[in-house]
Amino acid sequence: MVTAEQLMIEAGLRPTQARTAVLTTLINSHTALSQPEILNALQGVKEIDRVTVYRVLDWLQENALIHKISTEDRAWKYQLNSPKRSFKTPSSSSPGMLNNHGHAHLLCQSCGTVLCIHELAAHIPQAIFDTYQVSNIEISLKGLCPDCQKTTAVVHA
């Protein structure tokens, strides 16, 4: 498994303690995490506070290592970009598009869990990009995760 430091070095970026800690937390998570969830996971790590985590998340996103996902409660969750799935239009030189991704997300409307579905990617005709200046692409599927389905089934039984 690739480490946070390896990802940054391979991207030509300089790892720091804070960057490595935040990126490692996202690498080890099976779901997207909010800034408070990341901060909670890093409790006890010296020199990491709320502002540091926000700055690192912005830096990681600017450098296309992670992406952010808007949730039902208008909060952001962050998840590692899949190296082979980074979204870039065929003829795009727009820096804004380089930081986006073209896959779908599953959002649980009960517990707020967010999962990336890399198998469902955006297939957008080049004509769209030739006509419009696209700055963001989001594909979201909303419903109940397996755990919340079980809880709902027990309540209604």
Image: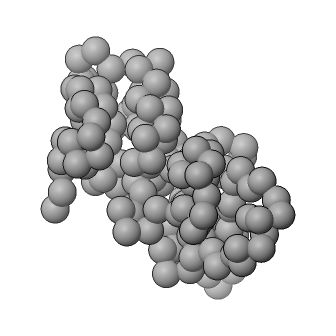
Apparent side of residue 155 relative to residue 40 in the rendered image (left or right):
right
Residue at the (56%, 80%) spot, across then down: 120
- Residue farthest right in this picture: 131
Residue 83 x, y percent position in the rendering: 36, 62
Quarter of the picture containing the N terminus is: bottom left
Residue 147 x, y percent position in the rendering: 50, 72
The colour scheme used to paint the residues is: one colour
Tell which of 125 and 58 is nearer to you.
Answer: 125
Q: Does residue 118 lie above or below 136 as drawn?
A: below
Residue at the (21%, 42%) spot, across then down: 9
Tell which of 107 and 155 is nearer to you.
Answer: 107
Residue 60 x, y percent position in the rendering: 42, 38
Residue 84 x, y percent position in the rendering: 37, 69
Tell which of 128 and 57 is nearer to you.
Answer: 128
Apparent side of residue 121 relative to residue 15 in the rendered image (left or right):
right
Residue at the (43%, 41%) spot, across then down: 63
- Residue farthest top in this picture: 47
Quarter of the picture containing the C terminus is: bottom right
Residue at the (41%, 29%) spot, across then down: 56
